[in-house]
Amino acid sequence: MSGCLEHTLHYSSPGHGDWGVVRVGMLAPESVQLFVCPAACGRHGALGAMKQGFKNRLFYLYVTQSDIIEGYDPLIPDAVDEVLAALSVEPRVFFVFVSCLDDLVGTDHEALLALLFERHPKIQFRIGRMNPISLGSKTPPPVSIQNNLYSLLEPADGQDDGINSFGNLDRIADSSELYAFTRACGAKEFRHISQYQTLAAYQDMAKSRANLVLLPSGLQAARQVRERLGIPFLFVPITYDPEEIAADYRRMWEFLMPEEEWNGFPGLLEARKEAEEEIQRARERIGSLPIIVDASAVTQPFGLAKMLISYGFHVVRVEAQECASFDKEHLEWLLKEHPEVELSQPEHHRAVLFDRRIEESLAIGVEGAYLSGSRYVADLFNDEGMFGYDGVKRLMRLLTEAVKAPTDLKALINDYGLVI
């Protein structure tokens, strides 16, 4: 595998993704957001909010150079009052977002929150951060916004048999065998933040007996919830390898049903057989077409590359800025067994040269398609809705559909409505 993981000046392509921290924050029921930033910082987000349907929930306080020099703390409470006065229904949650320059200005967030709570005691206020500088820290924006979302859960009176999914931004597809599995584990309900329309109903997640963390951005929030509410969690990163899926179901059983011996689960063997048959059908349809695996599409790009190669697909490149610890074993396998597979960093400053085009290829992920100029694109971001054997089947069908006709990549990116 040529190339190396290098930390340099970052490039952000138009195909980078469809979930930014503002959109993630919008998952909070009955919430609005005020973004405090210079006008140039807000322009992109404002346009994105209009295209994605959040115009009526996102507001901006544009600060001037003088405001930045003098400190804009006093401006925010009055701006919050203006927003509330403009709304026909008072929100239950109010995010005040600040941009990266706020770390340099030094706004007193604790004092600000105290003042806002005093003025509006019925509203939950949180500080959100849009700070690319912190991407390499322990709490980058995708993590801090999830911490904010789950900090809204309050101690519950009693516990029920519900199970929550954390980290994943889209609810797992109804067709997944995961629902039947959790019911077999005694789950009253398999819960996800996106299903709630009110803050009161969202509190049901605080009653659940366990959290399954499916994407790593939810890990820190799950730890905090365990400390505050006593809900244990298990990290089960989404994989498309049938063998790993089988092991994950056993791990989940042992976590959720510690006193019950694992004897397999009815339906899993059949689901695995169907998944492997779907893999073979996709392999026959795609043939030797070069495949590019993109980290914007899946949590474990190196794991997916390994799985595809193991089943006979022709993987030629993995687009990944870095390698997560739980994906490292897969990367090491690729380095040892298939060093011909190319590693490319989509945010590397050299990516703007566009000198690594493979037009006659199938890209799994829009960013990989954009950088490689791929004719065929499997449109997937953040493992959306995927899990288990059902996820494998759905991914294989996605690949099969993708190679039926070339993709209009410009239209596809435009339809996402910008990242906010």
Image (spheres, helix red, strand yellow):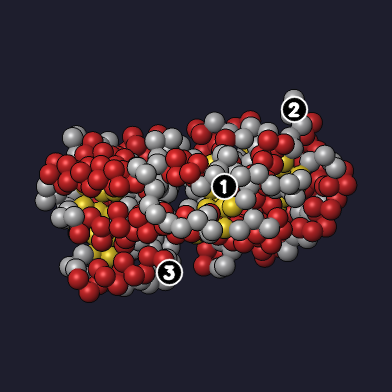
Residue placed under numbered mark 2 in the picture: 89
Give the CA distance from mark 1 to mark 2.
29 Å
Residue nearer the viewer, 191 or 122: 191
Task: Identify the mark at residue 164; answer none if there is no mark.
Answer: 1
Q: Residue visible at 27% across and 36% down? A: 408
- List x then y, in percent, for residue 414: 39, 36
Q: Are marks 1 and 2 in contact (CB under 8 Å)?
A: no
Residue nearer the viewer, 297 or 177: 177
Query: Image check: 59 left or right of 187?
Result: right
Q: Quadrant of the N terminus?
A: bottom left
How many C-alpha atoms fall within 10 Å of the one at disc 2: few (<14), some, or many (≥20)?
Answer: few
Identify the mark nearer the N-term, 2 or 3.
2
Element carrying mark 2: loop
Mark nearer the viewer, 2 or 3? 3
Give the CA distance from mark 2 to mark 3.
44 Å
Query: Image check: 333 left or right of 117?
Result: left
Q: Residue visible at 64% across and 41% down? A: 28
Give the CA distance from mark 1 to mark 3.
24 Å
- What amino acid is labelled 3 in the image? Ser
Element carrying mark 3: helix
Q: Is residue 164 above or below residue 108?
A: above
Residue placed under numbered mark 3 in the picture: 325
